[in-house]
Amino acid sequence: MSVKHFLTLCDLSGDTLKSIVNEAIELKKSLKATSPATTAMQGKVLGMIFEKSSTRTRVSFEAGMAQLGGSAIFLSPADTQLGRGEPVEDTARVLSRMVDLIMVRTFAHQRIETFAAHSQVPVINALTDDYHPCQLLADMQTFTEHRGDIAGKTVAWIGDGNNMCQSYINAAAKFDFELRIACPPGFRPNADLLAANAKRVSIGSDPQHAVSSAHLVVTDTWASMGQEEQKQQREKAFAPFQVNHQLMSLAANDALFMHCLPAYRGLEVSSDLLEDPRYSVVWDEAENRLHSQKALMLYLLNCQT
Ligand code: CP
Ligand code: NVA
């Protein structure tokens, strides 16, 4: 049987993604209700390669493995041979003989594809320059918990056409919602990806239009990891794209606000909106990284709870 990887949302069917989200909701309930630990992953080891920084992703994967009875190993370029130039192909072949599952956060998406092509065990994309599919599992879980099924709803993406935006494009197809993107010219997502999803996804440069009657409004940092030197130039281009109460007032009455975090208050989102529990579900969204990734790992390893 071929190895299942999770490099983008396109690797799994819509039904499978929805069942992972539902399993995440159940895992969350059982964690809150009783004693959390299970032995579903006893003896299983997750390798975690981080070539970029992380708070949520590292802690949610590591805590998730511990709660399932397994363990995780944090691997950074600063203290592995990967950082000294050992080829990714060799690293994948060696690590996948030792661990059961590998999570990778890196720059070029091609690098994780090469890694997965040489791995004997499932590889999970924990963020590349192009996609962040694990965050979408958590976002879809969060919407479902607060508002029910997202199918048929309207989502507004405001800001950079980055890895999160591109994962929202995939999610629109998989979870069957309308996505309206508003980006400044020059910061749009991949044109081929947009064209392939034109049925559900539209793009413009007017945040007011995108947000109008939307059920979910989402944004992210204007300068992703690796773009630090463009920060000033980006702040100028993105200034009219801040999500704040004024913009949210155009959305549906029960609209939610999400942000994968870390957030830069006063830039892509106003501090007031981020802290306003009438709209902002960012803390639930962050917590759901834990539950949804546990469900994902159980699925990829065919483990039962
Ligand atoms: N949202 C997210 O992936 O956060 P970290 O960079 O802290 O992992
Ligand atoms: N777009 C952001 C997401 C951080 C979780 C980045 O890539 O830095």
Image (tube, rainbow, N blue to C red):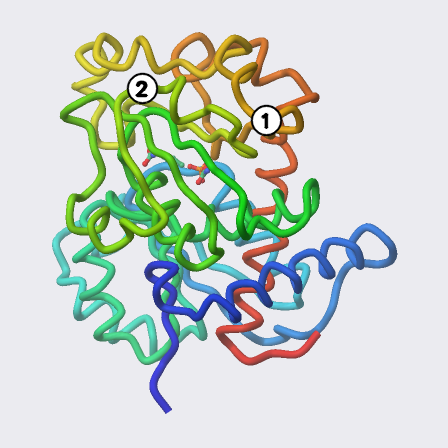
- Residue 120 to residue 204: above or below: below
Q: Nearer the viewer, residue 155 or 85?
A: 155
Label annotation for residue 58? none
Residue visible at 17% across and 23% down in the picture: 185
Q: First in sequence: mark 1 or mark 2?
A: 2
Residue type (three-letter) at the residue carrying disc 2: Asp
Q: Position of residue 293 (x, y in %)?
A: 54, 57
Q: Nearer the viewer, residue 27 or 162?
A: 162
Q: Secondary structure at mark 2?
A: loop
Screen quadrant of the N terminus: bottom left
Q: Position of residue 52 (x, y in %)?
A: 31, 40
- Residue 162 to residue 186: above or below: below
Residue type (three-letter) at the residue carrying disc 1: Ala
Screen quadrant of the C terminus: bottom right
Q: Position of residue 136 (x, y in %)?
A: 47, 48
Q: Nearer the viewer, residue 264 or 182?
A: 182
Res. 251 in view: yes
Taking the view exactly as shown, the residue that stands out farthest to the bottom is 1
Q: Look at mark 2 in the image and give the residue it sits on.
A: 206
**Where on the picture, by quarter, is residue 264?**
top left
Quarter of the rendered image showing ligand 2: top left
Q: Mark 1: give few (<14), some (14-19) or many (20+) Cα within 10 Å.
A: some
Q: Position of residue 132 (x, y in %)?
A: 37, 47
Q: Look at mark 1 in the image and give the residue it sits on.
A: 252
